[in-house]
Amino acid sequence: MLCYNKNVKQLATLITLCLVLIAPLSALTPEELVDKLNANFSRMKDGRTEITLDTSLQLLGCGGLNRQTGYLWFKAPDKVKAIVGKETYFIRGNRIRKIDGQGKRFYVTLLHAPDFTPGFNPKLMTYNFRLKTIKESSTEVVLAGIPKPGTLKNVRKVLFRIDPVNCLLTAMDLTLNGGLSGRVNLKYETVNGITVPYTCYGKSALEIFSGSLVGLVFNLSGQKLVINSGLPDSLFDPGF
């Protein structure tokens, strides 16, 4: 009887092992996938780069290119300093301070913006959107995101396109109010063995003073990236 029980136990173990070996890997939930993206992105503790920002408003069928150059500094999770033209911005989550070319100081508020409480990283996706996986393959995973109440008033839905092999967000397809749509593309560069975003380009929309949305074509690119150099907190302090 003991020998029979032992044989049955061994057979059950063998069957279980075979089932595990032939079963497909369980799909990650959207939250688990975002955690993987965030772990990859979080290898960058800080960074600095020269930037070029090209913008064009698509207003009444017309558009003209506006080019600005400057510098950008980042420190995880939520500190950004940017010099664009003659203006300097200090950003800490949703709190923005601006100093213009004459040294005048301003408090800036973004209307209907995401909640940047988690910082500037992929966790913004789960913090601001209800996510659902709508496509999954070996080369691309697509998450559909519906904004949570109180955020992104002008955005109805976002499709987040993810490279599951390299754990990178590659693009975002936007469904906006007013029948407008947009797409944001991301390009990456490897610096010191760490993959970091260096270009963000595409088409979105901007809310003007009347409350209407107008199309916005943009290209933000970085050059001469330096990461994990140990930027001090004092660099991101506007002093007011």
Image: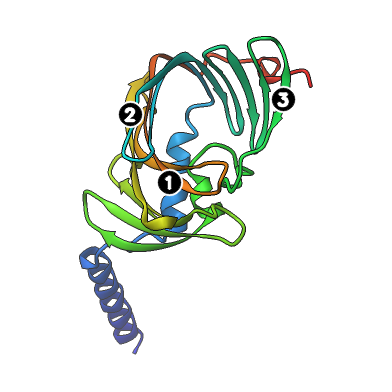
Determine which residue is flagged by label 2: 188
Distance of label 2 from label 1 (alpha carbons)? 17 Å
- Please state which of residues 73 and 150 is positioned toward the viewer in this rendering: 150
Q: Amino acid at mark 2?
A: Tyr
- Which is closer to the viewer, label 2 or label 3? 3
Determine which residue is flagged by label 3: 106
Q: Amino acid at mark 3?
A: Phe
Question: Horizontal and vertical percent for residue 16?
Answer: 29, 73
Q: Earlier in the sequence, mark 2 or mark 1?
A: 1
Q: Residue at x 59, y 33 (%)?
A: 77
The local crowd at label 2, few if under 14, some if 14 to 19, many if 20 or more residues have their Cα within 10 Å, is some
Q: Earlier in the sequence, mark 3 or mark 1?
A: 1
The local crowd at label 3, few if under 14, some if 14 to 19, many if 20 or more residues have their Cα within 10 Å, is few
Question: Horizontal and vertical percent for residue 234?
Answer: 71, 15
Q: Amino acid at mark 1?
A: Lys
Give the residue furthest to the right: 240
Q: Is residue 238 above or below residue 19?
A: above
Quadrant of the rendering where the N terminus is positioned: bottom left
- Can you tell which quarter of the image residue 209 is in? top right
What kind of element bears circle 1? helix
Give the residue furthest to the bottom: 1
Q: Is residue 42 above or below residue 178?
A: above
User: What colour scheme has been applied to the protein in the rendered image?
Assistant: rainbow
Q: Earlier in the sequence, mark 2 or mark 3?
A: 3
Cβ atoms under marks 3 and 1 closer than 8 Å: no
The local crowd at label 1, few if under 14, some if 14 to 19, many if 20 or more residues have their Cα within 10 Å, is some
Question: Horizontal and vertical percent for residue 166?
Answer: 30, 39
Question: Horizontal and vertical percent for residue 69?
Answer: 44, 14
- Which is closer to the viewer, label 3 or label 1? 3
Determine which residue is flagged by label 1: 36
Horizontal side of 127 relative to 10 (left or right) equals right
- Can you tell which quarter of the image residue 91 is in? top right
